[in-house]
Amino acid sequence: MVALASAPDGFTVTDLAQGVRQRMEWSPEKYSTRRAVYDLAKIRGKGLFERIRESRYLLRNAFVFIQLICSSQRVRIEIPV
């Protein structure tokens, strides 16, 4: 997701599925495009990505996305006021 999030023209669900498969070394049977659609719908529900065209998605809120990634890695981000 991190690599796809920086794509200036967005990404497709197929791009997401292929990226996850490569990163995790999974087969298409283990992580299908249908599973990627489900995962992206969950992430879109949190407001992190938005649909920019019929089949392309773009990162909406980079800071929240970074917080989510860091929280999964147990890293805390401190913001000076």
Image (cartoon, rainbow, N blue to C red):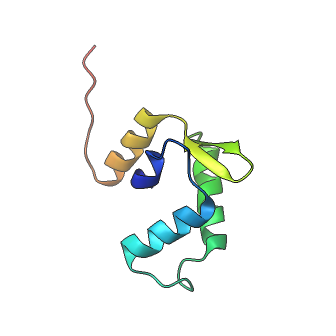
**Residue 14 appears at what percent x and percent y?**
60, 66
> In terms of depth relative to the viewer, which is nearer, 44 or 71?
44
Q: Position of residue 18 (x, y in %)?
A: 51, 71
Q: Quadrant of the N terminus?
A: bottom left
Image position of 64 with respect to 73: above or below: above
**Residue farthest along the front direction in this orientation:** 9
Q: Residue at x 37, y 49 (%)?
A: 69
- View extreme (right): residue: 54
The answer to whether 15 is drawn above or below residue 51 in the figure is below
Q: Residue at x 28, y 13 (%)?
A: 81
Is 18 located above or below residue 25 in the figure? Answer: above
**Residue at 49% across, 85% down:** 27
Q: Is residue 6 left or right of residue 30?
A: left
Hey, which residue is sitting farthest top in the picture?
81
Number of dots carrying numbers: 0
Residue nearest the viewer, comparing 43 with 8: 8
* Residue 57 x, y percent position in the rendering: 61, 48
Q: Is residue 68 above or below residue 19?
A: above
Left-right relation of 51 to 49: right
Residue 7 spot, x, y in % from top left: 47, 47
Residue 20 horizontal side relative to residue 13, left or right: left
